[in-house]
Amino acid sequence: MKAYRLVPGAGIAGLRQEQVPERPLGAFDVRVALHAAALNARDLAIARGQYGGLTGDAITPLSDGVGTVVAVGPSVTRVAVGDHVIATFWPDWIDGEGTRESQVRSFGAQLDGTLAEQLVAPETALVHAPARLSDAGAASIACAGVTAWNALFVQGGLRPGASVLILGTGSVATWALQLAKAAGLHAIVTSSSNGKLAEAERLGARGVVNYAEHAEWQDEVLRLTGGEGVDLVLEVGGQDTLARSLAAVRFGGRVVVIGGVSGWGDVKLSPGALVGGKKTLGGLMVGSRRMTEDLVRFIDTTGLTPVVDSVFPYAEATNAYERLASGSAFGKVVVSLK
């Protein structure tokens, strides 16, 4: 079968198309003919050698994909040939609180991923895709969508009417904004691009802040919330934004860290910022299969359609990486595998 292969750290130019042998099916394995695969920021990090826990061996990259079941092992009961399915990010994290053991292996890193004609996965790592989404939309769920769902509704515990500050307009942020709108939350979005902020308002943001124009952007967030601050912040900036995120959250509120674009080498944070405001700080890494299933039901119920920035043909997967690396994308960058 056709598959892309990449040695972590070889860069985008190291992406190569190859013919690889089909993996045999075990008793509980499923073979999926993939239709589309979506890129995430971590895929760039893997290509650049900035992602931990990997060997120097070549991998098939990307964690997110959707396709049709074409064969099943003799003991498979959760899916059947012909089903439309997506792969979960952590195949060993089924439900409940994640453990170190359940977050060791992920597709596109420790396991071969979705930038290929086929994926072989255990039946427990698959979820039925939303009934009405395009392949490009369904391919974007497993990493960015579930991360946003976990941050807002599992760790964040938000209810309709709550407020959330979403830093940036990356793929997790865009998912979070769409979920917030559909769930009746009040979302504030930051970006350095007025064009992207206009897109955020179109998607339902109640407030926007250009942090290039407002260096002390937390003050703008406080102004937009009548001095109270937001209930939750989705923090992606790292050392350059964490202190401001804590300043922007209300008394008793929560900051959930889902990324660190600026790194973590020089974080300056006083414990008083947490204790004095009874604020909490937590982190997460995507979510469980149960969360993925909950998100799929939410999509089917609400009709939410994820924003897709662009779809590239299989032969142009390198261009898809370049599009994501440019920082210009608004929504998911997807590779069509049909």
Image: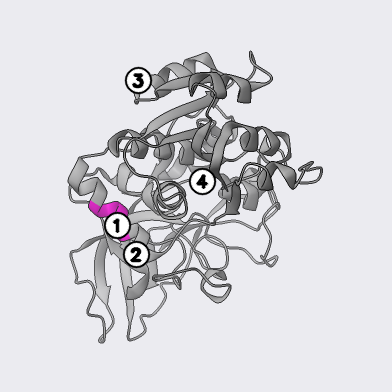
Q: Amino acid at mark 1?
A: Asp
Q: Secondary structure at mark 2?
A: helix
Judge whether residue 24 can be spotted in this image.
yes
Q: CA distance from mark 4 to mark 2?
A: 21 Å
Magenta: main secondary structure equals helix
Q: Secondary structure at mark 3?
A: helix
Q: CA distance from mark 3 to mark 1?
A: 26 Å
Task: In the rendered view, tell whether residue 297 sits above or below residue 268.
Answer: below
Q: Which residues are magenta?
A: 293-297
Q: Residue at x 35, y 20 (%)?
A: 202
Q: Is residue 295 magenta?
A: yes
Callouts 1 and 4 close, C-beta under 8 Å: no
Residue 139, position as x, y percentages in the image: 35, 49
Q: Secondary structure at mark 1?
A: helix
Q: Which mark is residue 294?
A: 1
Judge whether residue 310 can be spotted in this image.
no
Q: Amino acid at mark 4?
A: Asn
Q: Secondary structure at mark 4?
A: loop
Instruction: Find disc 4 in the rendering and name its residue.
Output: 40
Quadrant housing residue 191: top right
Q: CA distance from mark 3 to mark 4?
A: 23 Å
Front position among marks 3 and 4 = 3
